[in-house]
């Protein structure tokens, strides 16, 4: 009896027809090629993604390699940290701080990762070996074995105007590197 009722239904096609009482038209918004990109690659394409390195640096005994970025109060931009990576030739501790003071040393220049782009970063930088001074708060502390390390933040570590981010790697008598990447908006 059920089979007979199905046979009597005139519109049992799962796809409706344009002349039927219910018609919908699906729209496929896909356009070739389909490209999906991260916030980092979008910032890089816009000339707003930067990299900073200490290069391979010798750390004297009982000292740390220090790298710092300062986002001035009136900069008008927010810094979103993408990653911190590098390496050490011996066991060390990597510490990320909010605040702190790196005295003297050098002022490495951040590089725009859209090579050839003239956009400059708003941060002030400092690099030295020694001990972090001033007032600071430890955010992350990681013991490392000799070799490479990488911390991905994907923009989740934010340095607003008027704030400082400091990184310490040590203690010494080894060669180490800190590489920092971020975007600004």
Image (tube, rainbow, N blue to C red):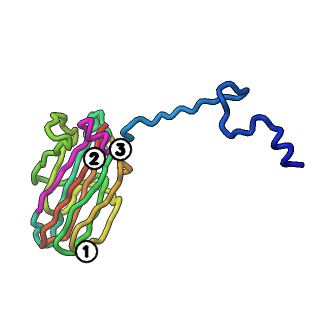
Please check the rendered image and state whether residue 155 is part of the magenta-colored stretch, yes or no.
Answer: no
Dot 1 or dot 2, earlier in sequence: 1
* CB-based contact (under 8 Å), mark 1 and mark 3: no
Q: Quadrant of residue 96?
A: bottom left
Q: Residue at x 86, y 48 (%)?
A: 2
Instruction: Name the secondary structure under disc 3.
Output: loop
Residue 53 position within the rendered picture, expressed as x and y whole percent measured from the top left: 16, 54
Q: Residue at x 14, y 56 (%)?
A: 54
> Between 126 and 112, which is closer to the camera in this rendering?
112
Tell me the number on the disc at residue 145: 1
Circle 3 Cα neighbour tier, 10 Å, few/some/many (<14 / 14–19 / ≥20): few
CA distance for labels 3 and 2: 16 Å
Residue 27 position within the rendered picture, expressed as x and y whole percent measured from the top left: 53, 32
Does 37 appear above or below 129?
A: above
Residue topped by disc 2: 182
Does 12 appear above or below 92?
A: above
> Between 108 and 47, which is closer to the camera in this rendering?
47
Q: Quadrant of residue 100?
A: bottom left
Left or right? Give the position of 143 relative to 120: right
Q: How many numbered marks, from 0 up?
A: 3
Instruction: Name the secondary structure under disc 2.
Output: strand
Residue topped by disc 3: 37
Dot 1 or dot 3, earlier in sequence: 3
Q: Which residues are magenta?
A: 40-56
């Amino acid at each position: 009896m059920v089979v007979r009722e199905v046979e009597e239904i005139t519109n049992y096609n799962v796809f409706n027809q344009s002349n039927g009482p219910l018609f919908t038209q699906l729209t496929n918004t896909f356009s070739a090629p389909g490209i999906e990109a991260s916030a980092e690659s979008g910032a890089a394409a816009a000339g707003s993604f930067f990299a900073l390195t200490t290069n391979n640096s010798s750390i004297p005994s009982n000292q740390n390699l220090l790298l710092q970025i300062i986002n001035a109060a009136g900069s008008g931009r927010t810094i979103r940290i993408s990653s911190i990576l590098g390496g050490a030739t011996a066991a060390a501790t990597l510490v990320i701080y909010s605040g702190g003071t790196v005295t003297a040393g050098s002022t490495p220049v951040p590089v725009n990762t859209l090579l050839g782009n003239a956009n400059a970063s708003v941060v002030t930088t400092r690099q030295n070996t020694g001990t972090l001074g001033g007032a600071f708060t430890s955010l992350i502390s990681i013991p490392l074995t000799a070799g490479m390390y990488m911390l991905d933040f994907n923009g989740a570590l934010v340095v607003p105007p008027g704030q400082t981010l400091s990184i310490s790697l040590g203690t010494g008598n080894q060669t180490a590197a800190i590489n920092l990447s971020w975007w600004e908006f």
